[in-house]
Structures are given as C-alpha cells and as structure tokens.
Amino acid sequence: MKSTLLYKILLGYLLLITIGVFALNIISDKLIYPKVLENKTEYLYENSNHLANTTLLEYYKGSKDINYLDNELLKVSQYTDTRILLINSNNLLILDTHNPNIMYSPKRIDAFDSSVTNVLYQQERFHNYFNEDYITVFSPVNYGYSVKGYVCLNYSIEDIEQKVNDITNLAYIVMLLFLSMTFIILIIFFFEIYKPIKVISNASREYASGNLKYRIPISGDDEFGRLASSLNYMASELEDADDFQKKFIANISHDFRSPLTSIKGYLNAILDGVVPQESQEKYLNIVISETERLEKLTQSMLTLNNMSTKSVRLDITTFNINAKVKQIIETFEGLCKSRNIKFELTFSSKDIFVLADLEKIQQVIYNLIDNAIKFSHNNSSIYISITEKGEKAFFSIKDTGIGIPKDSLNKIWDRFYKTDLSRGKDKKGTGLGLSITKEIIQAHNSNIDVISTEGVGTEFIFALDIAKETSKV
C-alpha cells in the first residue's frame, strides 16, 4: 500500500485549518461585527432615552443646574464607556463629557439635522467634531410640547472593532484547541491504525513474494492484534504446508523411484541375458511384487485424496463390528503363525452393531491390525477390545511391540511419515496407512487417539455410533 492514505489525511487536516481560518474571517466580518454593532446601538439608545426622560428633563425643568447635569452625564459616560454630548435646540453643543471647556464656550454644529431623531451614525466623526470614528445615537429632550435639546451618546468604532477582535481571537483559540485535539487524534491514528495497516500490508507483500517466515510484530487484544495473530498463524500453516509439500514430493519420489529402479534393473538384466533362464521366474516375481507395491501406493494416495475432499460421501450401513474384526484377523493368519503372534479378543457383547461405512471401517481395522503385527515382537500378543458405552462402541487395539518415540507421536498421522524404527522393520510401507485411518475416522465425526511408550507398546482407540436398529451384515 502506498502512503496515499496518510497524505490524504494530512491534506484534509491542512484543508480543515484553511477552511477554519477563512470561515472565521467571514463570520467575523459578516456576522460578529454587525451583531456587536447592533447590540451596542440598542444599548446606547436605551441609555440615551433614559437620560432624556430623567436627568436632562430635570435640567430643562429648571430643578437642576448645568454643573449638576455635567457631573451626572460624566458618571453615566464613565459607566457606559461612552462620550456624551448635549446639543440645544439651536444646534449649539453645550456639554461634552470628554471636553469640559465646551460648557463655557459652546460650539455650533450646523450640519446637525435636528429634525431627524434616532439616527445611527457609523464610522462618522459627528460632522468632523471628533478626531476618530464613532457611532452616535441621540434622543430628543421634550418638555412643554417642544424639543429643548438632544442628548447624544457616542461609542468609539475602534472599541467595537476591539470587541470583535476579542471575540474572534477567542474563536481562534477554540479553533486552535480543536485543531490540537484533532492533531493528537491524527497522531493516535498514525500509530494505532495507519502504522499497523502499513505493517500488515508489508507482511502481505512478504507472503506474496514467498517469504512465509515473516511474522507481523503486532501484539494486543484489539482488531489489529487479532488480525496480525491470525495472519501469523496463517503464515505458519502455509509454511508448514509448503514444507509438507516439499517432503511429500521428496517422499513420493523416493517411494516411486525405488521400485521403478528395481523393475528397470531386473528387466534390463533379463533382456541383456545376464539372468540365467532358470532364475528368470524368480526375478519376474520380484518385478510383479514391486509392481504391486506401486499399485498399492497409488491406490493409497487416491484413497487419501478422496477422503480429504469435502465432497466425500459415506455409505452408512449397520453391521456387526465383532464379526468384521474376526474376519479381518483371518486374513493375517499365515503371517501371524510364522511369527507366533496371537490375538486376544474382548467384546462387551456377543454382537455389537454400529452405524458406519463398512468398507472404510474395514480398511481402518485392517491398517491398525497390519501396523500392530508389523511392530510387534515374535511370540507376542495383540489385544483387541470393543466396549459399548452409552451410544458409542469403543474399539481398542493394543500391541506389546517396539512402541513409538515420544517426539514422533504427533507426526505419525502425516502423509508418508515413517519413524526410523518403522523403516528398520518394514521398508515396504507406504507411510499413508495412518493418514488414511485418521481421515476415515474424522469423516465419521469421531477421533482416533494413540497411547504409546517406546519399548512397551502402542494402543489405538476410536469410537463409532451404535446402531439402534440392527440387521446382520
């Protein structure tokens, strides 16, 4: 995976910052500033009306003098942070809270239009009276059915802009905090999500290139940890499968090469006249024996392949397993007599009927008996027992032979696996018998167990379903 995902996220982050700054500027100009201006104007208008109807009305009634009025307006000016002007009906400016001298030398504001009330001046200098921009709100002072004057409240535009800047700066701080938290989340995303994805992606490339020894260095109990564990397990299984495939090819090549070499050698010797006429029958019998060995190996491989497919079907029937065991033992009678090996049979009932595939279970029993004889000592016994427990019939075959080494117990089910002891006793085995046996038993939804001690003997145990309705087979 290329690093486009990270670049896209970083680009999105920068775009978020740009949009945020641009949006704040727009909001500040189009929303915040007009709103602050509106609120301040309403506030000034309320205060100007209040002054016109209270303090200034008392002045024009004659109950208060101008010095008292000047002091009262100065207090309101300081409280409201405004500059208050008083203009009489003749457009004379007679009071200015920021210019006490105007009281002694009034100034005419000719441009002031006294016929207009409640006028809001934005960024005006009150007819060039101020040195900076103000907003001005004024209210008329009415007394005796006439307008006596106008009270003007002025607020600096610079102060309004400062308030807008303060609000905008606060918004920038909030945005900065938000972006900081987003950046922290981005860092967490990088280490917790992006980096594991990249590591897993690199691992997939390693596996695709054939490096099945690569392991993902991710641990944890989250989804990535479990995914890494699953992929590591998959790689391990694939590596084992790859090793098995190599061993499989090596074993099958060896097992096919040996008889083929013998067949070729004997036939060439006969054709070249090296073998005397009277000995040819002997060597042809050897050729036939080797051919039968190849046939047996091929048949075993086909059987195991069919058992390994998901489409395998069992022909389930009801049969007497006790009778089948006795029948199979009879096929080994000649071999057992030559080595003085006896069978000890123990059945919990005279007849035990099971539900299974007759042909395949016969093959299982044949393989297990063949193995038991192969690894038993001369003048020994093989013990076979079939016991009913609940709805299962447990089959056990035990020999007192050479046993299986502890480090080989888990490998005996592998295809073509042969222990060194096995090769010493029987070089004609295909190494597929126990693999076929395990596949058949598993196809019957059961398991086969092995108990073995080297130098003491080996026991194989498996279970089959007992038939509820019996019919002799």
Image (tube, grey):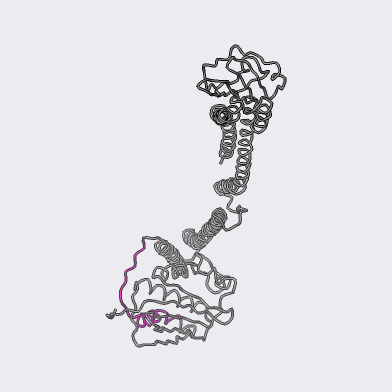
In front here: 378 or 21?
Answer: 21
Question: Can you tell which quarter of the image residue 62 is in?
Answer: top right
In front here: 237 or 410?
Answer: 237
Question: Can you tell which quarter of the image residue 314 is in?
Answer: bottom left
Q: In this view, does 306 lie above or below 367?
A: above
Q: Does the magenta stretch include residue 287?
A: no
In the rendered image, the quadrant that contains the N terminus is top right
Q: In this view, does 105 lie to the left or right of 206?
A: right
Residue 28 visible at all: no
Q: Is residue 317 magenta?
A: yes
In the rendered image, the quadrant that contains the C terminus is bottom left
In front here: 12 or 368?
Answer: 12
Location of residue 362 in the rendering, given as x and y in whole percent from the top left corner: 38, 74
Location of residue 132 in the rendering, given as x and y in whole percent from the top left corner: 66, 19
Q: Is residue 180 left or right of residue 227?
A: right
Question: Can you tell which quarter of the image residue 326 is in?
Answer: bottom left
Image point (39%, 84%), residue name? 388
Location of residue 328 in the rendering, given as x and y in whole percent from the top left corner: 39, 79
Location of residue 251 in the rendering, given as x and y in whole percent from the top left corner: 53, 61
The stretch in magenta equals 311-335
